[in-house]
Image (cartoon, grey):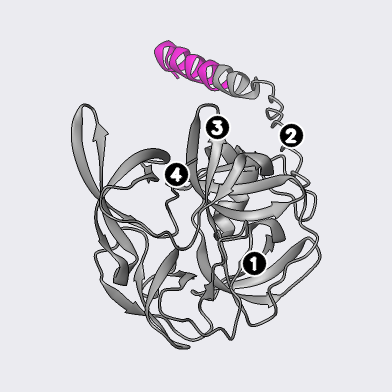
Amino acid sequence: MNKKLISALIVSTALVVLTACSSAKQEPKTAPATQPAAPAAQVVEPGKIAFDYPVAESTTAKAGDYVLVPSSSTIKSSLEKGGKDTVFIFYAAKMVEPGSKESKVEDLTGDKFSAPNALIVPIKSGETAAKGDLVLTWWQSGSGMTKGFVTEAGKTPKVVYSDGSTKGEDTLKENTFHKLTGELEAGATVAAKDGSFFNHGVVINVSGDKVLVNGFAGFMTVYNKSDVTPMPVKLEVKAGDKVMAPVIGSYKEVTVKSVKADKGQFEGEYDWAGEKTTETFYFGEVISKL
């Protein structure tokens, strides 16, 4: 074997040995990064809501009755991010099982969940409405809480919705409404004193000297009972009268221009940004003075 071939074999062997040695020198294994511990699950007292408000021990709703209640996702979200940052919309549902502090309900999509009794607005079953009554109900073509002025009496009355609807008359199904009295009760419209203003809202629950009110754009507030004034369900007004009516969430002086008593509404005029503005207002939402 010639010297060149021997030299080549020696070099090749050396390269193989060096490569093997290099491969054997592995980087030390790094321990996996420690994952932060999951936050402890929030423990919520049964019946507690996202406000400084007493737990409602019971509900007057019976199994099979209709009720108005926020969605399960809204209730959960309010407890996570806070009630003041939550928009509450009250939808129609059926009471499945009344309970202590919380009750099981089923919404119109079939979703069953437990809701705090303080957030459940009962609808009384078996009522007959008279013409001119103001009733608590929900949009029969949808599910959101509203009121209706009765234009045709009966167990399935015709109503004009008292929320700015352009739908005209609608017929309510049996057991889906009850008559409002003008007292401080769930479903009643109120003016709630806030400094020098009176906020417009709907009562959700009353407990002792506290009132839970759903206000403008669905934002909820707890008021002292002494600061809350329920609106009369009927108010005798005529053209030229001055009343207090809700304008963009708070009460403002409005001059009555014309009255449609058969529909429970009137046209009113008020000053807004230096201009006269005319709007439709509804019985059960206004009062002669505050």
**Residue matched to label 4:** 216
The answer to which of marks 4 and 1 sits earlier in the sequence is: 1
Q: Quadrant of the N terminus?
A: top left
Mark 4 vs mark 2, CA separation in Å:
40 Å
Is residue 167 shown above or below 9? Answer: below
**Residue matched to label 1:** 113
Is residue 28 shown above or below 51? Answer: above
Disc 1: CA contacts within 10 A as few (<14), some (14-19) or many (>=20):
some
Q: Amino acid at mark 1?
A: Phe
Mark 4 vs mark 1, CA separation in Å:
26 Å
The answer to which of marks 4 and 2 sits earlier in the sequence is: 2
Disc 3 to disc 4: CB gap under 8 Å: no
Q: Residue at 74% of width from left, 62% of height from top?
A: 102
Q: Residue at 69% of width from left, 21% of height from top?
A: 28
What stretch of residues is rendered in magenta? 1-17
Q: Residue at 51% of width from left, 17% of height from top?
A: 15
The answer to which of marks 3 and 4 sits earlier in the sequence is: 3
The answer to which of marks 3 and 1 sits earlier in the sequence is: 1
Which dot, 3 or 2, sits closer to the camera? 3
Q: Amino acid at mark 4?
A: Phe
Q: Amino acid at mark 2?
A: Ala
Is residue 204 shown above or below 62? Answer: above
